[in-house]
Image: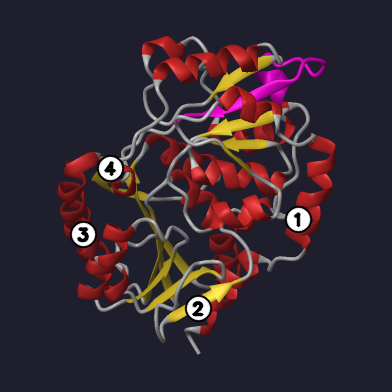
Amino acid sequence: MNIHVDIGHPSDVHFFRHAMAAWREHGHGVFTTCRGIPVAQQLLEGFGIVYEVVSRKRAGLALGLELIEHAARLWPRLRKNRIDLSVSFGGTFTVHAALLAGCRRVVFYDTDTATAANRITYPFASHIVTPAVYPGNLGRKHRTYRGLKELAYLQPGRFSADASVPAKYGLDGDTPYSVVRFSAWEASHDMGLETAALEDKLELMAALQRRGNVLVVPEGRPPPELAAFCRPIEPQDFHHLLYHAGCCVTEGASTASEAAVLGTPVLYINPLQPCYIPWLVREGLLSLSPPGDDMRAALDRLPRKDELREKASAFVAAQDDVTAFVVDFVENLQR
């Protein structure tokens, strides 16, 4: 079987990379395309995955132009490579071209709050696969797994934290550090939402500095006032840094989920709450501080890391092997 994998976000590389390796080992052809996102391209190259860029990344209302470009350039490539099955996370940039090319379309997703994108994607998918916590029933083509997207690459056996990584970035093992992730607010489901005020973010930085070192890893270009806290990192190192951090503060839901399953105390400061965020809150693995709340007080309420590690380990052990599920689900469609 010839399988196409489309990368629309850097986290998609992590989600699919183990599955792609397994499909190749099982004798399938795997053809990879992506949007022109530098971090995604760095990850693909770092993991030795051959790919083609089929659209230039755009943001906001210009996403519509990129959607057209991506589909127009993807369709002939699917035909040329005789693709049987197109697989993607989210699927908005992929399903229409794959339908025209006569491919079956498998969409994995976890963001129920991306309502506009889902409306123009789900009707054109052959199969929709979500975590079991995803609300509602999407019909006969809907399948679920027990767990989270992030477990496809952070479950034991898929990830082992490297204790030497923090030192690469001047982070002394005797001094705790915090990882901060500010979003670019460019996705379609971010439109109309407000981030925390810059003044509040600067106060947050000051509070974190009193705890130790601060590593800001922004998505996109940060305001000049926050640039001093930023330093470039190799994308492959991010999860190792996150594991060893004393805490994480993030606007990104995926980063919040990653920190939660790694057992790193995490404060999520985004008003948008996809379905898995409340689940992690109920499990005691994630704390909330939406814009307007006192983030410094919320920091003081974060649980201890040693307690959280044990709780996260038990939570992860109760979930499915997500990569194994992805591999089997796709391969079973051939039968």
Give the Cα distance between marks 1 and 4: 37 Å
Which marked residue is nearer to the observer: mark 1 or mark 4?
4
Mark 4 is surrounded, within 10 Å at the Cα level, by few (under 14), some (14 to 19) or many (20 or more) other residues, namely: few
Mark 1 is surrounded, within 10 Å at the Cα level, by few (under 14), some (14 to 19) or many (20 or more) other residues, namely: few
- The residue carrying mark 3 is 71
Give the Cα distance between marks 1 and 2: 25 Å
Which residue is depicted at the point 84% across and 41% down? Answer: 307
- The residue carrying mark 1 is 157
Which residue is depicted at the point 46% across and 27% down? Answer: 218
- The residue carrying mark 4 is 191
What span is in magenta?
166-182
Which marked residue is nearer to the observer: mark 1 or mark 2?
2
Which mark sits nearer the N-terminus, 2 or 4? 2
Which marked residue is nearer to the observer: mark 3 or mark 4?
4
Which mark sits nearer the N-terminus, 3 or 4? 3
Give the Cα distance between marks 3 and 4: 23 Å
Which mark sits nearer the N-terminus, 3 or 2? 3
Query: Disc 3 marks which amino acid?
Result: Ala
- The residue carrying mark 2 is 143
Marks 3 and 2 close (CB-CB < 8 Å): no
